[in-house]
């Protein structure tokens, strides 16, 4: 990606200013974890069973621990190392909870953690095509994030997405007992998981709202979670839960921030709910689709 600055209708290139040390990348991420990834920092340089984890983080949305490793070496096998860390966590769950509680002075219970949503994130200035291909499975709990630094204090951060045609990794891991045990416990959810056994009418309704949300602005991403499907642009803007006879849609604004003249959205600020934000509604048809988009757009503007 080439970056340019614009001065009086003339552009000039912005040169990359490479990181000299892996530690620089780590410090930048740890100081900005919430902004970059929506995560909570638990511990830097967390040691367990003779292994050192660069950054231990926690995802409050999925209620899961996230391991982050920073790499400048392009020759590592991110899959082998990723599965090693996933296995390490699943075999030592209590140690991670103790670290969370002692560091953050809280009382997280083991039953409150969704271990199936655990994942490993590798951060590097670049990844090889082999590394990208090796992680291009729809159900692998390993993510690749590229970061670059440029002149004028510019930083670009980009998550490498799986291709739409990505296959399952389970046939590959079935021949290795340790890898298979990890893939059995950890689940990477897809839209297909949420739409399984749903009627054609509900699937068509979801596709209509999905298309409308994606058309609101560029760079909205679809990110299936365990309980809902998230639509994100830097942060969650809306979440959809697939029901048997319709959809439950959430808008990610706090109570009092949404202008809803028709009063379609319900206040769920004081009740337990799966999605993000304080507003939800049940959808059974597309009659109010355009109006719903005007509400969701308030999160983006």
Image (spheres, helix red, strand yellow):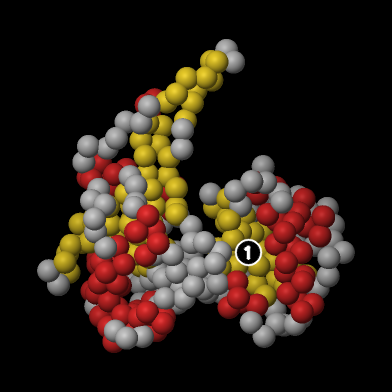
Residue depicted at 23% across the width and 51% down the height: 73
Give how far across and how far down residue 7 sits, in percent.
Answer: 53, 15
**Would residue 30 be visible to someone looking at this image?**
no
Residue depicted at 29% across the width and 72% down the height: 83
Residue extending farthest to the front is 130
Give how far across and how far down residue 39 sits, in percent.
Answer: 41, 57
- The secondary element bearing badge 1 is classed as strand
Give how far across and how far down residue 223 sits, in percent.
Answer: 55, 63
In this rendering, is residue 221 above or below 135? above
Q: Is residue 256 left or right of residue 42?
A: right
Residue extending farthest to the right is 287
Residue beneath label 1, please?
A: 239
> Circle 1: is it few (<14), some (14-19), or many (20+) Cα within 10 Å?
many
Nearer to the camera, 13 or 67: 13
Residue extending farthest to the top is 8
Q: Is residue 131 left or right of residue 282?
A: left
Give how far across and how far down residue 244 sits, in percent.
Answer: 72, 82
**Would residue 249 be visible to someone looking at this image?**
yes
Nearer to the camera, 198 or 127: 127
In this rendering, is residue 24 above or below 84? above
Q: Which quadrant would the C terminus be assigned to in this image?
A: top right
Residue depicted at 77% across the width and 79% down the height: 200
Q: Is residue 84 left or right of residue 272?
A: left
Residue depicted at 40% across the width and 69% down the height: 141
The part of the image, by quadrant, that contains residue 207 is bottom right
Q: How many marks?
A: 1
């Amino acid at each position: 990606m080439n970056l340019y600055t614009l001065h009086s209708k003339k552009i000039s290139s912005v040169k990359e200013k490479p990181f000299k040390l892996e530690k620089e990348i780590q410090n930048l991420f740890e100081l900005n974890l919430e902004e970059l990834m929506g995560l909570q920092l638990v511990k830097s340089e967390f040691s367990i069973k003779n292994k050192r984890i660069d950054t231990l983080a926690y995802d409050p949305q999925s209620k899961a621990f996230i391991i982050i490793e920073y790499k400048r070496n392009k020759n590592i096998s991110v899959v082998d190392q990723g599965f090693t860390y996933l296995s390490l966590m699943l075999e030592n769950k209590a140690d991670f909870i103790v670290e969370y509680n002692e560091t953050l002075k809280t009382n997280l219970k083991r039953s409150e953690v969704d271990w199936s949503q655990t994942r490993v994130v590798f951060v590097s200035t670049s990844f090889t095509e082999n590394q990208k291909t090796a992680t291009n499975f729809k159900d692998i709990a390993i993510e690749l994030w590229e970061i670059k630094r440029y002149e004028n204090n510019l930083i670009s951060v980009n998550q490498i997405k799986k291709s739409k045609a990505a296959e399952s990794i389970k046939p590959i891991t079935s021949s290795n007992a340790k890898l298979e045990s990890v893939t059995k416990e950890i689940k990477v959810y897809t839209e297909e998981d949420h739409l399984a056994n749903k009627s054609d009418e509900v699937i068509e309704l979801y596709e209509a709202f999905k298309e409308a949300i994606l058309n609101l602005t560029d760079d909205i991403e679809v990110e299936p979670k365990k309980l809902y499907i998230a639509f994100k642009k830097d942060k969650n803007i809306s979440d959809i839960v697939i029901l048997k006879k319709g959809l439950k849609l959430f808008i990610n604004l706090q109570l009092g921030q949404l202008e809803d003249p028709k009063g379609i959205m319900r206040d769920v600020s004081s009740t337990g709910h799966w999605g993000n934000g304080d507003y939800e509604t049940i959808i059974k048809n597309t009659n109010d689709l355009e109006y719903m988009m005007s509400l969701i757009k308030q999160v983006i503007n």
